[in-house]
Image (cartoon, grey):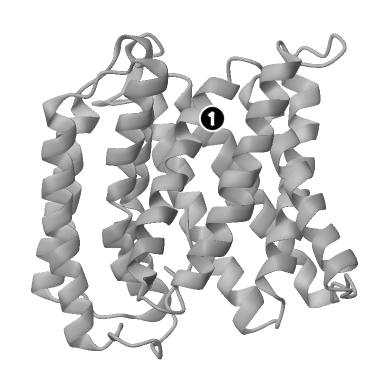
């Protein structure tokens, strides 16, 4: 039965990229980030205060990592993601997010001194090579905004979003493991803080006449669906799954997400999916397979619930 919820989680999560592209038709990316995160943060903190009846107290030593978490995992991650999503297909954006396990493995080496064996290095190289066909193929819209070497600015924005997202989970782990803050409190507070950063940014770059919203009905419907799908359902489902599966196994399972996103992008937006996309998914899977079994052999992950914590213990 838990395997069914693995499938269900990534099936639901894949809709967030298509929802994001549709909602961007009703409001600019910076304002969309601020509205979504402020509402989600208030809902999570309200849940703790009203339903759980917990005191919303933040200790002095928790302020800086919490602000940094809101700045990186919420504000910068979503600003880069939504900006890049304007020019990329849902499937391509989602596939770039599959860089997370490889970036996590590299950061584990620097942060936790995890060994990088020859087999693991081969797996990482294969995984990165697997991204090349998709990154080298450009749609007309991303080609219009220019590129840096062989990567378009939209692709670089998505890569930046992945890096900030992974770094955010390092901070979240620190707040939970070392500072004793609950995940709901950390997520709710960081979403609210990140939403405030985005709101201030929006005041300077968006046209407030009287608001940046172009289509109010489409905007509020899209924001509500994204909050329900990503902030409320998938974050909690992913946390529940991490108690039953290793984070690296879930990274494998996460490769279903680009395929689902490709389906929803085709169904809702009429986006075409190239053969290179499916080729990349296959090559990346081989790279992840090598990394997974090497970490299993080295003891960084185990097959049961009790396992060493890694910075991958969190979703995108």
- Whether residue 65 is visible here, answered yes or no, is no
| Residue 39 position in % (x across, y down) | 78, 43
Q: Residue 268 occupies which quadrant of the picture?
A: top left
Residue 117 visible, this angle: yes
* As drawn, 305 above or below 295: below
Tell me where residue 182 appears, x and y as whole percent.
Answer: 70, 75
Q: Is residue 286 left or right of residue 105?
A: left
The N terminus sits in image quarter = bottom left
Q: Depth check: 99 or 153 in front?
A: 99
**Which residue is denoted by mark 1 in the rendering?**
20
At numbered mark 1, what does the secondary structure look like: helix, strand or loop?
Answer: helix
- What count of labels does the image hold? 1
Q: Is residue 230 left or right of residue 113?
A: right
For image coordinates 39% across by 33% down, the residue present is: 156
Q: Residue at x 82, y 14 (%)?
A: 208
Q: Quadrant of residue 217?
A: top right
Residue 97 vs 116, above or below: the answer is: above
The residue nearer to you, when weighing 141 against 11, is 11
Q: Residue furthest front?
A: 1
- On screen, residue 257 versus residue 54, left or right, reads left
Q: Position of residue 187 (x, y in %)?
A: 68, 61
Residue shown at 53% from the left, 21% from the top: 22
């Amino acid at each position: 039965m838990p395997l069914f919820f693995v499938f269900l989680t990534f099936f639901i999560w894949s809709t967030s990229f298509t929802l994001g592209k549709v909602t961007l038709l009703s409001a600019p990316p910076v304002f969309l980030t601020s509205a979504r995160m402020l509402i989600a943060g208030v809902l999570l903190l309200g849940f703790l205060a009203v339903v759980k009846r917990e005191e919303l107290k933040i200790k002095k030593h928790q302020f800086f990592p919490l602000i940094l978490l809101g700045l990186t995992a919420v504000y910068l991650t979503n600003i880069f993601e939504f900006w890049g999503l304007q020019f990329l297909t849902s499937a391509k954006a989602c596939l770039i997010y599959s860089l997370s396990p490889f970036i996590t493995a590299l950061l584990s080496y620097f942060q936790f001194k995890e060994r990088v064996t020859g087999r693991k290095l081969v797996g990482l190289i294969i995984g990165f090579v697997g991204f090349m066909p998709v990154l080298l193929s450009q749609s007309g819209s991303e080609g219009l905004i220019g590129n840096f070497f062989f990567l378009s600015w939209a692709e670089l924005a998505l890569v930046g979003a992945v890096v900030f997202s992974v770094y955010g989970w390092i901070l979240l782990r620190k707040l939970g493991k070392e500072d004793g803050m609950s995940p709901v409190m950390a997520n709710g507070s960081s979403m609210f803080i990140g939403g405030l950063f985005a709101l201030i940014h929006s005041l300077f770059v968006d046209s407030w006449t009287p608001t940046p919203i172009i289509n109010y009905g489409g905007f509020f419907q899209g924001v509500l669906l994204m909050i329900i799908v990503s902030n409320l359902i998938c974050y909690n489902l992913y946390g529940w799954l991490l108690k039953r599966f290793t984070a690296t196994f879930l990274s494998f399972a996460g490769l279903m997400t680009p395929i689902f996103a490709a389906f929803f992008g085709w169904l809702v937006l009429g986006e075409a999916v190239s053969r290179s996309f499916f080729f990349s998914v296959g090559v990346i899977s081989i790279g992840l397979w090598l990394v997974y079994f090497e970490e299993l052999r080295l003891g960084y992950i185990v097959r049961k619930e009790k396992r060493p914590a890694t910075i991958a213990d969190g979703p995108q």
